[in-house]
Image (tube, rainbow, N blue to C red):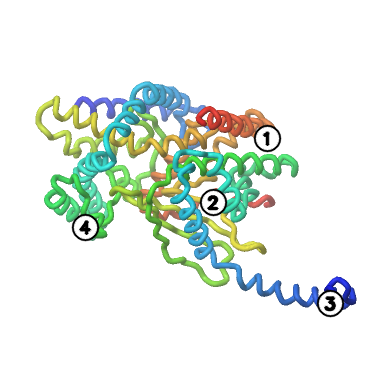
Amino acid sequence: MARADRVCAALLLAGVLAGCATSGRNPADPLEPLNRVVFSFNDTADKAVIKPVARAYRAVLPGIVRTGVSNFFSNLEDVWISVNDVLQGKFQQGVDDFGRVLFNSTFGIAGIFDFASELGFEKHNEDFGQTLGSWGVGSGAYLVLPILGPTTIRDGFGLLLDTQADLVFYIDGVPVHNSLYGTRAISNRANLLDASSVIEQAALDKYAFVRDAWLQRRRNLVYDGDPPREREELDDEPTK
Amino acid sequence: MNPPNNQNPVAMKISFCLLFALLIPLAQAQQPAPDVLVKSITEEVVAILKKDKDIQAGDAKKAADLIETKIVPHFDFIRMTRIAMGRSWRDTSPEQQKQLAAEFKTLLVRTYSTALSNYRDQLIDYKPLRAKPDDTEVTVRSDVKPSGSSQPVSIDYEMEKTPDGWKVYDVKVGGVSLVTTYRDTFASEVREHGVDGLIKSLATKNRQGERTKSDKT
């Protein structure tokens, strides 16, 4: 609960600040000055603690174990993903995703093996922020949350619900679910080690690069990989 | 027997012209379709990557050479730079445009080589091309499935038809454009330090990339 409360407080604060902020140059990011502070805090925490732990995790555990861990959490997520499929009116996908859970939880031994993917039932990426987006809710201001990282006002509210629907949350015993949270975070970070090394190489201004990539990514997810072209994208002719 | 260069020069010229007249339409007819082009280049590069232990071990120099010879010729870096610059492209002198495109190209090649050295045994699946025969701009879509189980990542190539074949002017990974992601960074750099300032910070970034690379090896 405490985590949800913190997210909620951060969102409300962000909403209030978004109302009066003026300095942002990117219209999607009116909170830029504040976001930059949080971003550099996150970046420092990542460099000092999270990334080294993820590196060690990747170095110590063989690939097959890491895949098993990430499959286990991914299987738990599929439950909420299938609910979001249905909320977005994608009934067939909802049935498929729920089928993934049933199949992987049993034959895949509590989700450690993802046999459903091998049978052609592809994993999907859905969450409540995307559901809100599919209902026509705009993304709102870009927001960087402490530790949790980039999001937007809409997706932050989505995250509140995602957190409540998180099955790990309902596993009894504080030490157990805290260590599960920790393992999941490290496993997710380890999966992103390659991607983050590409960002380090690519970005002139890491903050702006991550923000712009994140916003495009979310837009792409809301439109399930086929977003309408933005006018801006086409406006590249040297003459009028 | 007379060697061929002792033949009547006029006849030589005429036969050369005839030869070229025959070859030019042939060359045009042989320009591969955009999806065929992307697929064949990717397959060629992947085959090299699978064999090359140096690149797999993170030899960025070698990866960059591979990109330079196999991939770069099929990209339109001027157009990529123009898209990344947005409106300020118009206020940029031809000399600055050339420098910008050169620095941006280096940066993108570096980035791509980092990504390539992370390549393992991913499967690439090409989607059928949705285009009419006379289209001059198409999107070639592919899905890359990483080993393990996670979701496939889409890689889409935006391509345009030019006299020297189809050229890529944007690559979107998971919907994130390699080019438009730089727009805000470029715009704020130009606003604060001018076009020359942007060229300078691109150059600095590229030199940094060089240094960290040589530190590693």
- Residue B195 disc label: 1
Q: Which chain carries label 3?
A: B
Q: In which quarter of the image is the N terminus of chain A?
A: top left
Q: Which of marks 2 and 3 is nearer the N terminus?
A: 3
The answer to whether marks 4 and 3 mark residues whose Cβ atoms lie closer than 8 Å is no
Marks 1 and 4, how far apart at CA? 51 Å
- Residue A96 disc label: 4
Q: Which of marks 1 and 3 is nearer the N terminus?
A: 3
Question: In this rendering, is residue A12 above or below B167?
Answer: above
- Residue at the disc numbered 2: B170
The answer to whether marks 1 and 2 mark residues whose Cβ atoms lie closer than 8 Å is no
Q: Are marks 2 and 3 on the same chain?
A: yes
Q: Is residue A107 visible?
A: yes
Q: Are marks 4 and 2 on the same chain?
A: no
Q: Residue at x 57, y 29 (%)?
A: B211
Q: Which residue is drawn at 31% across and 45% down?
A: A132
Q: Earlier in the sequence, mark 1 or mark 2?
A: 2
Marks 1 and 3, how far apart at CA? 50 Å
Residue found at the very far front of the displayed protein? B1
Which of the two marks, 2 or 3, is nearer to us in this view? 3
- Residue at the disc numbered 3: B14
Q: Where is residue A73 in the image (x, y as percent from the top left)?
A: 22, 40
SS class of the residue under badge 4?
A: helix
Residue type at numbered disc 1: Val
Q: Is residue A182 left or right of residue B64?
A: left
